[in-house]
């Protein structure tokens, strides 16, 4: 199977590349190599390679920046997906696109299922929802993930700055610095390696096309996450609980973000708990930080 991965230098794309390359021929391209906002370039590149699968790891993820630059967010998160869907359809490829919990308004207290209507509250969230819809123009899987962490950022060889919330929290804990964490925001963090495994499983089992939630099973506040992470790092964390209202953020963010993996489980793919994922992530970080 030939796999094309876009956004190759991203955290999730790096994990997808590592997982897929074990068994398949992978061509990974960065934005500099393939700009998704250039429709003709996308069509030409896909028709030349003729991949069996396209994994879209590219995204505009600056949630607050999208409020000031809506055209940029829409061009990548929505119309870039439309280009990939059109290209995938033209060569009979399967498109796998990754979306976000931000498409919901966060006003419930039970994990969101795929059947619950989305209600985006920001430009970023709206652009991601449009991307979901455009992905539907091809044979597709849309996987909603959230609070991604791990992957190459927990590797000894990675020299890029760690960008995820969990990665930054681990850095603070290991450096004996204070960690500010929301006690009023509930999440189901997604370990990129688990997302990559689930993606490959969907493709291999030829599960029904459509929308799936793909997160660490269970839920907790960010304070819960920091406490669990510190336990697995064998450190005592200096946690300062904060609330979302304490911060002046341009974009609205959902307070309750937990997603249900029940649909994914119904096709035989079980996601580990976020606690289990944090344990594996912490082990990798401790190895990376040990003297050589």
Image (cartoon, helix red, strand yellow):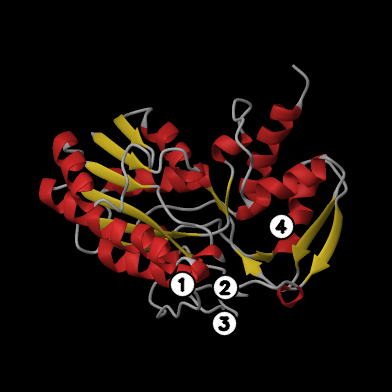
At x 38% / y 76%, what residue is drawn?
115
- Secondary-structure class at tag 4: helix
Disc sitting over residue 108 in the figure: 3
Question: Which comes before the other along the chain, label 1 or label 2?
Answer: 1
- Secondary-structure class at tag 1: helix
Categorize mark 2 by other alpha carbons within 10 Å: few (<14), some (14-19), many (20+): some
Circle 2 or circle 3, nearest the eye: 2
| Residue assigned mark 4 | 225
Give the alpha-carbon distance from disc 1 to disc 4, as whole Å. Answer: 27 Å
User: Left or right: 222 with respect to 135?
Assistant: right
Where residue 212 sits in the image (x, y, percent)? Answer: 38, 62
Give the alpha-carbon distance from disc 2 to disc 3, as whole Å. Answer: 19 Å
Question: Which comes before the other along the chain, label 4 or label 3?
Answer: 3
| Residue assigned mark 1 | 123
User: For the view shown, which residue lies furthest in the top direction?
Assistant: 292
Where residue 191 sits in the image (x, y, percent)? Answer: 55, 48
Relative vertical location of residue 155 with respect to residue 173 in this rendering, above or below: above
Question: Which comes before the other along the chain, label 1 or label 4?
Answer: 1
Disc sitting over residue 251 in the figure: 2
Q: Are circles 3 and 1 on residues that touch, CB within 8 Å?
A: no
């Amino acid at each position: 199977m030939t796999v094309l991965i876009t956004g190759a230098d991203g955290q999730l794309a790096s994990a997808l590349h590592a997982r897929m390359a074990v068994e398949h021929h992978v061509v990974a391209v960065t934005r500099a190599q393939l700009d998704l906002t250039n429709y003709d370039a996308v069509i030409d590149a896909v028709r030349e390679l003729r991949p069996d699968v396209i994994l879209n790891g590219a995204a505009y993820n600056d949630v607050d920046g999208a409020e000031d630059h809506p055209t940029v967010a829409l061009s990548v998160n929505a119309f870039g997906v439309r280009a990939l869907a059109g290209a995938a359809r033209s060569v009979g490829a399967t498109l796998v696109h990754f979306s976000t919990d931000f498409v919901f308004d966060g006003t419930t207290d039970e994990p969101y299922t795929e059947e619950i209507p989305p209600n985006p509250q920001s430009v970023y969230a709206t652009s991601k929802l449009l991307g979901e819809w455009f992905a539907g123009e091809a044979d597709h899987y849309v996987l909603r993930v959230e609070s991604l962490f791990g992957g190459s950022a927990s590797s000894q060889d990675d020299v890029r700055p760690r960008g995820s919330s969990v990665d930054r929290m681990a850095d603070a804990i290991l450096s004996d610095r204070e960690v500010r964490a929301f006690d009023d925001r509930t999440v189901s963090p997604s370990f990129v390696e688990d997302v990559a495994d689930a993606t490959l499983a969907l493709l291999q089992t030829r599960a029904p096309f459509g929308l799936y939630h793909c997160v660490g099973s269970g839920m907790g506040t960010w304070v819960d996450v920091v406490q669990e992470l510190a336990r697995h790092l064998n450190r005592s964390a200096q946690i300062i609980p904060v609330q979302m209202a304490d911060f002046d953020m341009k974009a609205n963010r959902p307070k309750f973000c937990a997603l249900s993996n029940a649909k994914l489980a119904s096709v035989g793919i079980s996601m580990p708990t976020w606690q289990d994922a944090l344990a594996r992530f912490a082990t990798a970080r401790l190895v990376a930080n040990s003297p050589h």
